[in-house]
Amino acid sequence: SYELTQPPSVSVSPGQTARIACSGDALPKKYAYWYKQKSGQAPVLVIFEDNKRPSGIPERFAGSISGTMATLTISGAQVEDEADYYCYSTDSSGNQWVFGGGTKLTVL
Amino acid sequence: QVQLVQSGAEVKKPGASVKVSCKASGYTFSNYDINWVRQATGQGPEWMGWMNPNSGDTVYAQNFQGRVTFSRNTSKSTAYMELSSLRSEDTAVYYCARGGVPEYWGQGTLVTVSS
């Protein structure tokens, strides 16, 4: 079955840039999406279609894609950005969606 | 405003089935797909599949094929997820979410499978 691979954790100081990677074989042809999730809450979509921000998401959140790697970049990370982040995409058939394993972002 | 309100927590024995409901409001129910996602404690989300409320078409994740059924009642703007042959590993919070890519989420329903 298809898999998206993320690092388990990323740590930055406030004001620094955080980068979270997600690798998957189908990413050159399929969009990547990113969710932010805080403990006890439902996931929140922060990036769609590789690099678009939903309304209400701060400009410091950006997405990019290069080959089989999607990256979520948080410029000037803030304490409130501390959360688990998941990439989300589909396999090459477009029928089976999958979440990455998640990356715990620590900002301190 | 868009709202998805799910049914309450359930406790089931191994081998039983559970049916979770998801009532939509604030938009035209038939116009948007409904995804189902579950999340065990301390784990990442797991996509279960989606349903087109207009046509009733469904796509199930391979991991759940043969064990999960999505349905809907358009007159009640409500979607349903039924999972059968429950085992302890199915203990999780189950979410419904609107959209081809989920953007609006229900509050989640805790399903506990325990003998």
Image: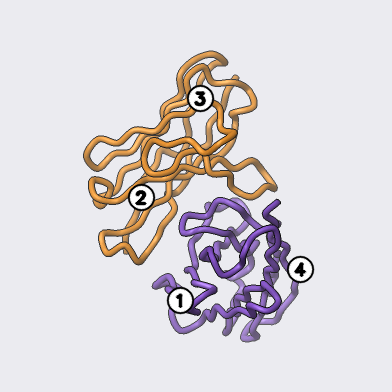
Chain colours: A orange, B purple
Q: State which chain disc 1 sits on.
A: B
Disc number placed over residue A59 in the picture, else none: 3
**Which chain does the numbered disc 2 sit on?**
A
Q: Position of residue B28 (x, y in %)?
A: 62, 64
**B29 up-or-down from A50: above or below:** below
SS label for mark 4:
loop
User: Label 3 neighbourhood size at 10 Å, few (<14), some (14-19), many (20+)?
Assistant: few
Proximity of marks 3 and 2: CB atoms separated by less than 8 Å: no
Name the image quarter holding residue A39.
top right
The answer to whether A95 appears left or right of B5 in the picture is left
Q: Give the chain of mark 4.
A: B
Q: Give how far apart the Cα atoms at labels 3 and 2 are.
A: 25 Å
Q: Are marks 3 and 1 in contact (CB under 8 Å)?
A: no
Residue carrying label 2: A4
Q: Judge the density around disc 4: few (<14), some (14-19), many (≥20) Cα neighbours within 10 Å.
A: few
Measured in 3D between alpha carbons, the distance from the residue under mark 2 to the one under mark 1, in whole angstroms, is: 23 Å
**Residue type at the position of mark 1:** Thr
Distance in Å between CA atoms under marks 4 and 2: 30 Å
Q: Residues within 10 Å of mark 2 (few under 14, many from 20)?
A: many
Residues indicated by labels 3 and 2 sit on the same polypeptide chain: yes
- Let me know if residue B7 appears in the view: yes
